[in-house]
């Protein structure tokens, strides 16, 4: 919150993004994104920006596959054809270059398969994975 207030004061004083960033020890691109994400330099307010940041960070968020039926269908279809999650993710990126709703990382596909509390992809689809593991090991 203190940094957001400093950004707000810097904007009000007419300081450049670079000078605000230097004063906070942050990258100018970070400050620029923060300002742009929260209404631009004309509408930036520290309290509102902080509230929006906390709202965006709320967990748990719904899984991307749970929200987008067409994406879920495409992923399940490719898994049934024994495509790896990495191949599916790359194929979606090339097939739908301008449609952000049709993008998903291979990690999100694995999570949807192995963390059944999400319940998005059917457990039967794990048999189509190449390793045939029923559990995934997290390396910590």
Image (cartoon, rainbow, N blue to C red):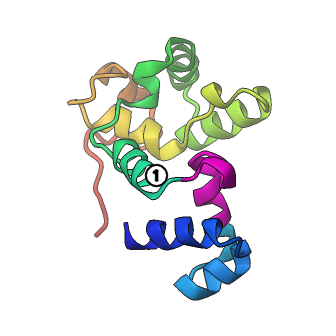
The residue furthest left is: 117
| The quadrant where residue 123 appears | top left
| Residue sitting at x 69%, y 83% | 19
Residue 138 screen position, x and y as percent = 29, 59
Residue marked by disc 1: 49
Crowding at mark 1 (Cα within 10 Å: few <14, some 14-19, many 20+): many
Quarter of the figure with the N terminus:
bottom left
| The quadrant where residue 28 appears | bottom right
Query: Is residue 25 positioned above or below 74 on the image?
Result: below
| Residue sitting at x 62%, y 38% | 89
In-front residue for pair 89/97:
97
Indicate yes or no whether the magenta region holds residue 137.
no
Q: Is residue 62 left or right of residue 115?
A: right
Quarter of the figure with the C terminus:
bottom left
Query: Is residue 34 positioned above or below 130 on the image?
Result: below
The residue furthest front is: 13
Residue 134 screen position, x and y as percent = 27, 38
Indicate yes or no whether the magenta region holds residue 37.
yes
What segment is highlighted magenta in the picture? 31-44
Query: Is residue 110 positioned above or below 53 on the image?
Result: above
Residue 51 screen position, x and y as percent = 36, 48
Q: Secondary structure at mark 1?
A: helix
Query: Is residue 126 positioned above or below 45 on the image?
Result: above
Magenta stretch: helix, strand or loop mostly: helix
Residue 11 screen position, x and y as percent = 64, 66
């Amino acid at each position: 919150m203190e940094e957001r207030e400093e950004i707000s004061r810097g904007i009000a004083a007419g300081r450049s993004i670079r000078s605000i960033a230097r004063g906070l020890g942050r990258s100018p691109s970070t400050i620029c994104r923060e300002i742009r994400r929260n209404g631009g330099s004309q509408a930036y307010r520290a309290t509102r920006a902080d509230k929006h940041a906390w709202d965006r960070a709320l967990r748990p968020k719904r899984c991307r596959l749970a929200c987008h039926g067409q994406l879920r269908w495409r992923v399940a279809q490719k898994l049934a054809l024994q495509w790896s999650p990495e191949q599916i993710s790359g194929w979606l990126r090339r097939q739908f270059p301008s449609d952000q709703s049709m993008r998903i990382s291979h990690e999100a596909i694995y999570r949807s398969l192995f963390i059944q509390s999400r319940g998005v992809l059917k457990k039967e689809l794990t048999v189509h994975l190449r390793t045939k593991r029923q559990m995934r090991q997290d390396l910590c």
